[in-house]
Image (cartoon, coloured by chain):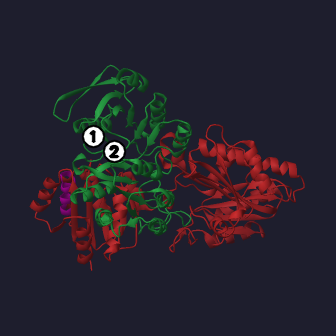
């Protein structure tokens, strides 16, 4: 098994005709992901052509609205590559159309927009991943995001991370050690977002095919501390961790909107201490993330 | 993006939040006229000369001067702070040069309150934070007397409800000591509700009034205004362009922004060039782990191009402290061969004289490594992140 995405995931690509959207739609289709529809307003009726995993021709119908796409194709999941000022609306549209999982890759969405989106998600059974995230992959089953496919191997370890390329680094290390992955989830670097560590950890905890988890955090906020507390009380599987930003100065935003130490809060040392107190083994350097998880088995 | 106090107060005024009368001044010789005008208008002989910089803690650092001696004394006060660096707890040791002043009417301050709106990650809502301890460093208050801080959260569906603003008003005993408590409470409720509306409409990420005062007459007035806008919303706020004060920004960081790079300068001597913010932070950490010190945080982005890599090299080398450069790339969307071409071009064009260690991994890694090897340049290649960090640390020792 795996979490969030698998062979049953049927995807509508919102923003499939844009440069990033079309590039990554092709990459996902080539991986074998079932991309059943695209959506770009005023481009309905066109067809997006790509090559599948066996180099077969794949023709993806494009619709004007997500709700048409869902009705015509049975799509159950959306991935969003819409420019920042339209992205919140795209998430709301996916939600309205009944998508059960919505993955938003778009970066630089205004925070007040995301606050309204979060409010709309209250009481809904849909799940939002992101924004400003690399997406999610269950190796061998479904790639729904912008991560490089070739570094992943199917296996039994879960990865959850606030970062993009640092996740690839961790996955690369796991794969090199022969430790394949059940699912890798990038929750994104924004302060107001969808899934956070705890929700993903819960899913991994319940997934019979995940045997251990790599959790990668960074400075800013207190998601890691809350997760550590949850792990201490509930997690049945080993968790190894890493926190980026030990050397980051306070008050400076380190790339991600959410990666900032403010008011003396959100430092790496606080997070590492909370994680260690919860029984998480924290890698002493980012070069030893894979090794650290292996040492717990 | 931060704006000055006087710009924030102009925004408050537009929304109907009471602020003292004031005049922004860009050179000390214009201070006396401004002071005279305020004294004439208010019939009060007291003015306040305030340094305008994008950092808090100005009062304690001597950047806010109450002047009782009239226009000439105001000029003397202005000359003491104008054109000189003001060092506050938020500026760092080098301080921030004062290039703008705000001359304001003096007010009869009865009480100093604190009100701030921020984005709360846990509730995923805007939090309205209020305290009776205005004028103080609120972080100190939070650390030592957290019970003195009251918080309400704004529901994005209907904004801050009036009852929530009243809860804050009564918790802070806003009416206490006022000649007209009812009016004082109503004014406070109106200010807080307006702030919540302003925060959302103007796309703020921080909006702080410290202090929000109660005057002797029982009026609520914003004596300060600290506003930070959410950079992500700049495309829908053309008016922000006029509010930018580039003197307040780090020129290197501004240049980076224009080039689509994310850059923060640090104190060390090893320049870093990395794709992705998390990996960039981790790269700084691993340099420190092996005994070196990073000179910067630099994220060239997930989809770095050859030109961006060249620009990034240029920026790193602007710092004379840099004794070596570590390039750490995990190519996902970014392709290693394109990055390698950028590295080679930059090395040749800039005549690189410091050691360079390059770690490439991911998409098109073999082609990338070949380009570096065949360039004939003195580039040390690293097998992984740990290897690369060790190599650059020993090369710069």
* Chain B display color: red
Residue assigned mark 2 = A2
Q: Is residue A116 left or right of residue A40?
A: right
Residue A194 in the image: x percent, y percent? 47, 45
The residue located at (18%, 62%) in the rendering is B348
The residue located at (81%, 64%) in the rendering is B45
Mark 2 falls within which chain? A
In this orientation, does residue B162 appear?
yes
The image quadrant that residue B59 belongs to is bottom right
| Res A141 label | 1
Q: Which residues are magenta?
A: B337-348
The residue located at (63%, 68%) in the rendering is B143
* Chain A display color: green
**Callout 1: SS:** loop
Q: Is residue A76 left or right of residue B207?
A: left
Mark 1 falls within which chain? A
- Disc 2 crowd rating (10 Å Cα; few below 14, some 14-19, many 20+) is many
Q: Are marks 1 and 2 on the same chain?
A: yes
Q: Is residue B152 magenta?
A: no
Q: Is residue B70 left or right of residue A209?
A: right
Most foreground residue, B315 or B33: B315
């Amino acid at each position: 098994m795996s979490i969030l995405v698998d062979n049953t995931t049927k995807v509508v690509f919102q923003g499939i005709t844009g440069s990033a959207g079309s590039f990554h739609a092709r990459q996902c289709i080539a991986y074998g992901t079932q991309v059943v529809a695209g959506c770009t307003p005023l481009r309905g009726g066109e067809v997006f052509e790509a090559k599948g995993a066996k180099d077969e021709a794949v023709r993806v119908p494009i619709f004007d609205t997500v709700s048409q796409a869902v009705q015509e194709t049975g799509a159950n999941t959306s991935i969003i590559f819409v420019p920042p000022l339209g992205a919140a609306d795209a998430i709301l549209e996916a939600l309205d159309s009944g998508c059960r999982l919505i993955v938003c890759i778009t970066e630089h969405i205004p925070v007040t927009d995301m606050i309204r989106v979060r409010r709309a998600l209250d009481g809904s059974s849909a799940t939002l991943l992101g924004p400003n995230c690399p997406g999610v992959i269950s190796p061998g089953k479904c790639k729904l995001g912008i991560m490089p496919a070739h570094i992943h191997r199917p296996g039994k370890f879960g990865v959850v991370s606030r970062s993009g390329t640092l996740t690839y680094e961790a996955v690369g290390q796991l794969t090199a050690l022969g430790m394949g992955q059940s699912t890798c989830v990038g929750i994104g670097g924004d302060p107001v977002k969808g899934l956070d560590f705890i929700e993903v950890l819960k899913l991994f905890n319940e997934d019979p095919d995940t045997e251990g988890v790599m959790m990668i955090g960074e400075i800013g906020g207190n998601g890691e501390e809350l997760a550590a507390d949850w792990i201490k009380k509930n997690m049945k599987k080993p968790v190894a961790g890493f926190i980026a930003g030990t050397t980051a100065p306070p008050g400076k935003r380190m790339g991600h909107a959410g990666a900032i130490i403010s008011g003396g809060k959100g430092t790496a040392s606080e997070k590492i201490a909370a994680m260690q107190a919860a029984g998480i083994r924290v890698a002493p350097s980012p070069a030893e993330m894979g090794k650290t998880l292996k040492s717990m088995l | 993006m931060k704006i000055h106090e006087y710009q924030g107060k102009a925004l408050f005024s537009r929304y109907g939040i009471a602020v003292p009368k004031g005049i922004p001044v860009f050179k000390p010789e214009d201070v006396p006229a401004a002071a005279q005008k305020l004294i004439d208008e208010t019939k009060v002989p007291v003015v306040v000369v305030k340094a305008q910089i994008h950092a808090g803690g100005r009062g304690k650092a001597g950047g806010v001067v109450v002047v009782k001696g009239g226009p000439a004394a105001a000029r003397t006060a202005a000359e003491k702070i104008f054109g000189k660096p003001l060092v506050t707890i938020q500026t760092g040791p080098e301080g921030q040069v004062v290039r703008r002043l705000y001359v304001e009417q003096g007010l009869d301050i009865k009480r100093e309150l604190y009100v701030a709106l921020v984005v709360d990650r846990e509730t995923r809502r805007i939090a309205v934070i209020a305290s009776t301890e205005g004028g103080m460093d609120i972080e100190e208050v939070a650390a030592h007397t957290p019970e003195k801080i009251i918080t309400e959260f704004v529901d994005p569906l209907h904004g801050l409800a009036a009852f929530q603003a009243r809860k804050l008003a009564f918790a802070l005993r806003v009416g206490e000591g006022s000649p007209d408590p009812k009016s004082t409470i109503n004014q406070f409720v109106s200010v807080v509700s307006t702030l919540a509306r302003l925060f959302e409409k103007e796309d703020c990420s921080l909006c702080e009034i410290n202090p929000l005062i109660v005057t002797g007459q029982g009026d609520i007035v914003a004596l300060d205004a600290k506003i930070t806008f959410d950079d992500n919303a700049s495309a829908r706020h053309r008016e922000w362009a006029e509010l930018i004060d580039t003197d307040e920004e780090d020129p290197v960081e501004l240049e980076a922004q224009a080039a689509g790079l994310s850059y923060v300068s640090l104190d060390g001597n090893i320049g870093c060039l990395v794709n992705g913010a998390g990996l960039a932070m981790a790269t700084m950490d691993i340099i420190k782990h092996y005994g070196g010190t990073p000179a910067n945080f630099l994220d060239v982005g997930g989809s770095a191009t050859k030109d961006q890599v060249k620009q990034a090299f240029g920026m790193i080398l602007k710092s004379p402290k840099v004794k070596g450069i570590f390039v750490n790339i995990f190519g996902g969307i970014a392709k290693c061969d394109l990055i390698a071409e950028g590295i080679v071009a930059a090395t040749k064009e800039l005549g690189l004289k410091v050691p360079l260690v390059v770690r490439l991994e991911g998409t098109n890694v073999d082609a990338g490594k070949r380009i570096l090897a065949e360039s004939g340049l003195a580039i040390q290649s690293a097998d992984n992140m740990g290897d690369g960090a060790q190599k650059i640390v020993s090369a710069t020792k």
